[in-house]
Amino acid sequence: MPRAMWRGAIQFGLVTIPVRLFLATETRGGLSFNMLHEEDHERIQMKVHCPVHGEIKRSDTVRGFEWTKGQYVVLEESDFEAVPLKTVRSIEIEQFVPAHGEDDGTRFVKQSYYLEPEPVGRKAFGLLKSVLADSDLQAVCKIVLKDREQLAALDPFGPTMLLTTLYWPDEVRDVGELDIPEAEVEFKPAELAMAKQLVEALSGEFDASRYHDEYREALLKVIDSKVAGQPVEAPAPEPQASKLTDLMAVLEASVAAARGEAAGAKGAAAEAEAAKGSEEPISVEKARKARSGSSKTSASKASASKSAGASKSSGASKTSKGRAASSAKSGTKSATAAKRRKTA
């Protein structure tokens, strides 16, 4: 059971809904590495150092705010709890807005959290979730997390609601800082039609299970090879980037490649469905063993038939030789008997 990282209440109007907050995501993509001394590969220790007392324990540290140069005021945990602001222990709903509005301010997401209602507030929690879902609305709210007030959005999400913290408007950079041409680029009708075909070839229903961190998997293979003392395989050469001198040719090639990949994916899916319909699914390893076994059996049968044929032919030749020898002997005997008659 995950541990709640915050406890408080959703507040809108005079309605109070006690809830608990849980992190909705966890980081698994990156691999953690340790800093080592290059000479002897000993792990580097990051110690907490005080300029006056030298090395100290991390538990002996406190949080301080530098209010003037070199002067600090220490804040205890109780000081943070005593901040005279509603959002310290409540999710204060400020406004309800369309869930899919044109304002892109709610697209700059920082972190997502699941909400779990306390037993006493389950009915009100379900009522708010149903109203938001039926009205296609999103609640814009504020909450204090990690010693800072955060702008957030509240949305229905399956059996619960999702609280998503957002960047404040003054934290979002202006797109005017980018070097983007003001004039609209003109396209040829054929280029636009081919681009639409490429988009259609790559379109489909989103399936999150199709996507995984390929870089992490490849890096783990490199690490396994180094642990086993084996040479690391060199990556395949990168295909050269196409020059956009002929946009139509590049689009046509892209459409053909996308359609080929889609056809291959459909064929693999059809094979998987056919395998599901069989009485007993056969793994790849079993299929390989079955193929090798059948090839060995056929080879042994062929060799057995060859040896049987050879033995038959050798037996036939021996029989014919014996017959020829016996006929030769009988011929010699009859010739000798004839000579004896003439002599007599």
Image: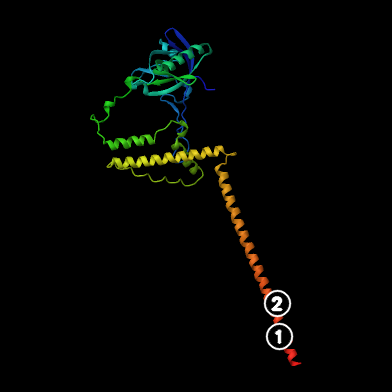
Q: Is residue 22 above or below residue 251?
A: above
Residue linked to disc 1: 335
Measure the C-alpha gap from mark 1 to mark 2.
Answer: 14 Å
Across and down, in percent, residue 261 comes to 42, 40
Across and down, in percent, residue 259 comes to 40, 40
Query: Is residue 177 among what the camera can see?
Result: yes
Residue that sits furthest to the top in the current view: 14
Q: At label 1, which amino acid type do we have?
A: Ala
Q: Is residue 26 above or below residue 264?
A: above
Disc 1 on helix, strand or loop? helix
Q: Nearer the viewer, residue 263 or 36?
A: 263
Mark before the other along the chain sequence, 1 or 2: 2
Mark 2: few, some, or many residues within 10 Å (few <14, many ≥20)? few
Marking on residue 186: none
Residue linked to disc 2: 326
In the picture, the quarter occupied by the C terminus is bottom right
Across and down, in percent, residue 276 comes to 55, 37
In the picture, the quarter occupied by the N terminus is top right
Nearest to the eye among marks 1 and 2: give it.
1
Q: Nearer the viewer, residue 289 or 49?
A: 289
Mark 1: few, some, or many residues within 10 Å (few <14, many ≥20)? few
314 left or right of 134 in image = right
Way the structure is coloured = rainbow
Disc 2 on helix, strand or loop? helix
Q: Is residue 127 above or below residue 111?
A: above
